[in-house]
Amino acid sequence: MLQQLLNDTITTLNRVVDRRVFKLRATETGTVLYVGGGIARINGLPSITSEELVRFPDSVLGVAINLEPNEVGVILLGDSDKLIAGVEVSATGREADTPVGEGLLGRVIDATGNVLDNDKPLRYNERRSVEQPAPAILDRAPVTVPLETGIKTIDALIPIGRGQRELIVGDRQTGKTSVAVDTIINQRDKGVVCIYCAIGQRGTAVARVIDTLHKHDALANTIVVVASDEDPPGLRYITPYAATTMAEYFMEKGQDTLIVYDDLTRHARAYRELSLLLRRPPGREAYPGDIFYIHSRMLERATCRRSKCGGGSLTALPIIETQAQDISAYIPTNLISITDGQIYLSPTLFHKGLLPAIDVGKSVSRVGGKTQYPAFRSVAGDLRLSYSQFEELESFARFATRLDEETRATIEHGQRVREVLKQAEHHPLRASQQMAVLKAVNAGLFDDLELDKVGDAEALIQQRVLNDLPELCERMEAGKVLDDSEWQQVLNVASSTVSTIKGQSKE
Ligand code: ATP
Ligand code: MG
């Protein structure tokens, strides 16, 4: 009996050691040979492993990423001002890790778990390694549930599903962050846990996002993970992996999660900086050879899990900044090929005031279409095609002095569709509100309304449809197919609203 117990205990202990929950190893020390630019080169530490944490004096941590015969290249996660060559360092025997748990919700932290919002200590359940393997193919399920952004252009024309990876790409100051933040705001009553991961941005920009989330009651459901432009490049590099680990904790509990990486251009630059300092051979645009892999292994962790494996999903919205609208540059093309589609924001549309400045022609969602509610699909169906036809027609019609009646009517209708697709930032709409407005514009109800009155009519329809047809709205949002008489009820509300607006403008 006693022998059996002893054997069992030994087996369990061996298993724990095998899983490397802890390692039995004498503490090793090494010496810093060089420190600067956010990296250190170390002599000694012969049995250190890749990705292992290294402890410097003053509790500064680093991650060993270059293992060479005589030295170890380490990226620093903390302030290196006081570090000098010659100081002693020790291996810790653990990988770079980050706290996870419900206590992180509503907090602003960095990748290592330092709190940045107030003095309250961080409550967390455990620490997990920042690098985790992506879920196995057999554990993944097709994407079937929509992730509603509340933005008409996206939900109608470029729908996103839970578990999808959709790139947000555009030049600087085109509204990339606004699209992502609006999507987070729209999840506040949908039970989706959100993570906003800011990489290499100015502190003021991050503070603005936090303030917006707070004002719209979306912070309680969100974790903000920050590595600002003043943080060492090592911290900027590991932050998105740490943020993904935090999201995975919720996904493994069967919850839906959304993560925004703002932005991966700066992440790639941080990695390039570290790689050059670590003397890795530079490749195209001076990026190291594994630049594709650093993003693909991160985004492969976004998925929708089979219900047999516990369910849950992780939707990723990586952001990329382009230079002079060049989406064929190195990093943007890498990310376009890794993700399941892209939302392209055009500076031309932005300057014309067509906000959000989403270029429908250049944007695509490869898997989200299947997740769109049937009622939504029936109103958004051919909007995309007819809208691009209108844009083409409009640009040609600019040269014509006289237009035939049919062309004029198509252009006037298209202009109203464009007006309807405009949307103020931080003003996400419910799916039923969007469907009602799109149904109205498709039915031509706005065609004889003055262009500057379309916005007013739209706002009133959004209000009235919720007030007058609450049950129908719920059916729409539950993914039910509406019959003709139900659509007629929606159209009746819309046409009486348009009459009200017409009446007001005559007075
Ligand atoms: P950066 O390249 O600096 O990160 P960005 O592409 O993330 O910029 P934002 O910061 O989201 O762009 O937006 C740029 C500006 O455009 C902000 O001042 C924002 O308020 C404004 N803006 C974005 N979307 C809209 C919108 N739909 N309606 C009105 N203003 C908007
Ligand atoms: Mg931004």
Image (tube, rainbow, N blue to C red):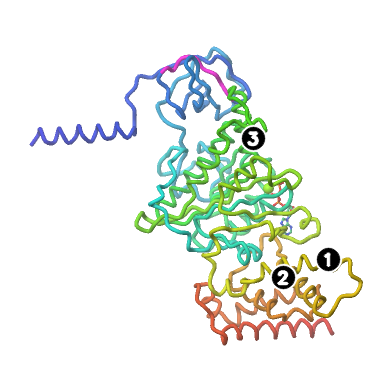
**Tag 2: amino acid:** Val
> 263 or 126, which is in the foreground?
263
**Taking 282 as reference, is 124 left or right?**
left
Chief secondary structure of the magenta portion: strand
* Disc assigned to residue 269: 3
Badge 3 marks a residue whose secondary structure is helix
The percent coordinates of residue 349 (x first, y second) are 77, 58
The percent coordinates of residue 49 (x first, y second) are 42, 25
**Taking 73 as reference, is 206 left or right?**
right
Question: Which residue is drawn at the image coordinates 62% and 22% (left, top)?
Answer: 81
The percent coordinates of residue 161 (x first, y second) are 53, 60
**Taking 478 as reference, is 263 left or right?**
right
Badge 1 marks a residue whose secondary structure is helix
Q: Are marks 2 and 1 in contact (CB under 8 Å)?
A: no
Q: Quadrant of residue 488?
A: bottom right
Residue behind mark 2: 420
Q: Residue furthest toward the right? A: 401
**Circle 3: is it few (<14), some (14-19), or many (20+) Cα within 10 Å?**
some
* Disc assigned to residue 396: 1
The residue stretch that appears in magenta? 39-46
Question: Which residue is drawn at the image coordinates 14% and 32% (left, top)?
Answer: 6
Q: Quadrant of residue 182?
A: bottom right
| Residue 44 part of the magenta segment | yes
**Tag 1: amino acid:** Phe
